[in-house]
Structures are given as C-alpha cells and as structure tokens.
Amino acid sequence: MAELAVDKHVKYILAVEKNKDSFESVVMDHLRMNGAYWGLTALDLLGKLDSVNVDEVISWILKCQHESGGFSGNIGHDPHILYTLSAVQVLALFNRLDVLDIDKVATCILSCVLLMKLFAHRWLYESIVSSCTSCFAQVSKLDITGLQNEDGSFSGDMWGEVDTRFSYIAICCLSILCCLDKINVEKAVSYILSCKNLDGGFGCTPGGESHAGQIFCCVGALALTGSLHYVDKDLLGWWLCERQVKSGGLNGRPEKLPDVCYSWWVLSSLIMIDRVHWIDKEKLVKFILDCQDVENGGISDRPDDAVDVYHTYFGVAGLSLLNYPGLKAIDPAYALPVDVVNRIFFSG
Ligand code: GRG
Ligand code: ZN
C-alpha cells in the first residue's frame, strides 16, 4: 500500500499559503480564514506547525476581527460565525487565545441571533446601520444572556439563516472560550434533537434530510454538551457505517459518491458514538492514500481528481482518527489536535 507522503503534503500546504495568486488562493479569497484553519491544523497533525510564521498569521487574523468581536473570511469582508470558529481554532493551535477579548467574541456569537431578532428585515437593518455606524458594537455590548432564538437554534450572521452547523459552531467556540454558560444549553440541545430523523441521522433544520456533515455537527454539539445519551447509537451507527462503499471510501448520503472529506464527517461521528469498529478501517486508509498526489503533494476528494487544501486537511485528519502512524491524534468533537484541547482545559 502507498504511504502518506508527509513531506510533499507539507510543501503543498505551505505553497498554497504563500502563493496568493494561485487559482486555489483566488477562489478561496473570501473564506481564507477557513483555509487557514484547514492548512494549519493539517500541518500541526503532520508535526510541522513550526514552519509557519506565527506573528504574521496572528496579525492577519486580528485584522479580520470586527467591532462586534466576530471574524470575517478575509480582511474587509463581513463577519460570520463560520469564520469566527476557524479564527478561534487557529489561535488555539498557536496557544494565542490570550489575544482575544473573550467576552467580545462570545457576545458576538450571541448577538448574531439578537441582531436577527431586532432587525428581521434587511431594509430595516440597513436603514439602522446607515444612521448608526457603530450599531454592531452597541448591540454586541448589550449584556443580555440567552440570546438564542426562542427554539434554541442559532443563526450564522445578521441575516438570520438557521442551521445545525451554526449550533455546533456556537457551542464549540463558546466551549473553547469556556463561555458555554452564556447560552441556554438545554434549549440548544433540544433544538438539535428536533432535527433528528427516523433513520437515526440529523439534518440542517427540523425535517431536513440526514447528511453526514450535519450529523457531525449535531453529534459534535451533543458530545460537547454531555448530551450523547439522547442518541440511538446503534441506529445512527448503522446509518453511518452504511456510508462505506466498495472502494473503501465513505459517502455523505445513500447513493452518493465517496469523498475523502467524509472520512472526517462520518468517522468522527462514529468515534463519538463508539461505533468506529463497524467500518473497515484498512480499506478506508487505502482509499485516502489513493487520493494523494504523490508527486506534488495534496489530497483530492476521489482518486485522480485535483487536490485542494480542504480535502488535504480532511484526508490527514481522517488518517489521524484511524491512528495512522506518525500523525498527531485529533479530537473528534473539537476538530483540533488532542494536545491543543488538553492545553486549553488542563493547563494554567
Ligand atoms: C470545525 C470541522 C469543523 C467544522 C465546522 C462548517 C461546519 C462546522 C460543518 C460543515 C458540515 C457539513 C454540512 C459538511 C458537508 C460538506 C459537504 C461535502 C457538502 C456537500 O454536500 P452535497 O450534497 O454533496 O453537495 P454529496 O457528497 O452529498 O454529493
Ligand atoms: Zn468533499
């Protein structure tokens, strides 16, 4: 079987990060914060985080922080909860959570929901913003607890889209920042449970089709809040292990093609519910290794496709979950290296 081309992947990730004119950098411009999390976490799992200039990364991240405390995908873009988690995760990787005004970020996550409630109509929100440029700051400074939607759900930004992805992100972010007490965890859990389907899986909103990505978010959020006892582990485990196809790869839903990123979404969920022994691990390792570009580095979604940082990260993270030799262990709920999570909770 092919081996993991560690040095090639490290070189590939560092090159994407440096070459700001490359196709991949250009198409990822607006979600560069996510890209930074994928690339840097992969480097850390590969044991090469020290090849990065930490001060440069931290100073760029801080330039993406907004008045509200939330982060955008790149300098000059709008803040969103999706990028806020990536920013917090990268700061955690570098042990630099100290640069955050913790209350500010936590309040931002909560105030997304408040903003949506207060300014439910775009025109109304815009007219308020145009007459008051520090609107965000004023709202986020309101010290109101329990700013979730009535039903416990979370929105991603001020426009109000609701999705279980945002429940996971809010819970993961607040947990890393030790601020979970600021939300109504019971209601957050009950909203997630309302997105559970008869097949044992979870969707993005109540009644939404089960999808491995949403299952990761719901199971992750339940794990982080100590609520996994609400999951029918055998039923969900069965749905998840049926995602493995002949080639050894995993798909995200029935009848779909396998894709390396599901090595993360499916496998992490199986580990959290203690059913990882229900898939053929060796075949999955082989599938991921077959998706490598062994000449130029990087991992693709399927064998012979073009590589990208997203699939490189999830391929490496999947191998880490499979205990591939030489890789750091990754935590399936926080999606951060285990030593980073331990440092957050068990040091000073
Ligand atoms: C910290 C790891 C981490 C995540 C943060 C953003 C987020 C929280 C989770 C996203 C979960 C999710 C919905 C993942 C799925 C992504 C994906 C591959 C979507 C493609 O879906 P389809 O239906 O593709 O277009 P398929 O594979 O079904 O054909
Ligand atoms: Zn994918």
Image (cartoon, grey):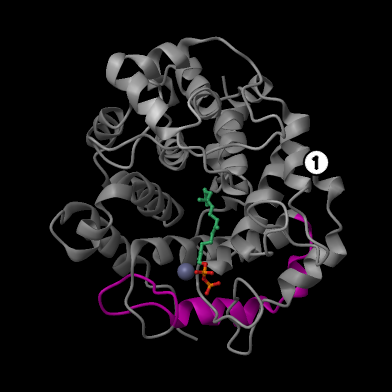
Residue at x 42%, y 66% (from the top left corner): 311
The image quarter in which residue 342 lies: top right
- Residue 308 in the magenta stretch? The answer is no
Q: Quadrant of the C terminus?
A: top right
| Stretch in magenta | 273-302
Q: Amino acid at mark 1?
A: Ser
User: Residue at the left extreme?
Assistant: 21
Examine the rendered structure and indicate whether residue 189 appears above or below residue 18: above
Q: In terms of secondary structure, where does tag 1 sit?
A: loop
- The picture places residue 287, in percent across and down from the top left corner, at 53, 81
Task: Residue under label 1, please give it.
Answer: 227
Q: Residue at x 41, y 11 (%)?
A: 138
Horizontal arrangement in the rendering, residue 119 relative to residue 151 (left or right): left
The residue depicted at 55 percent of the width and 29 percent of the height is 113
Residue depicted at 29% across the width and 28% down the height: 62
Residue 215 at x, y = what percent? 67, 57
Direction from residue 326 to residue 180 in the image, left or right: right
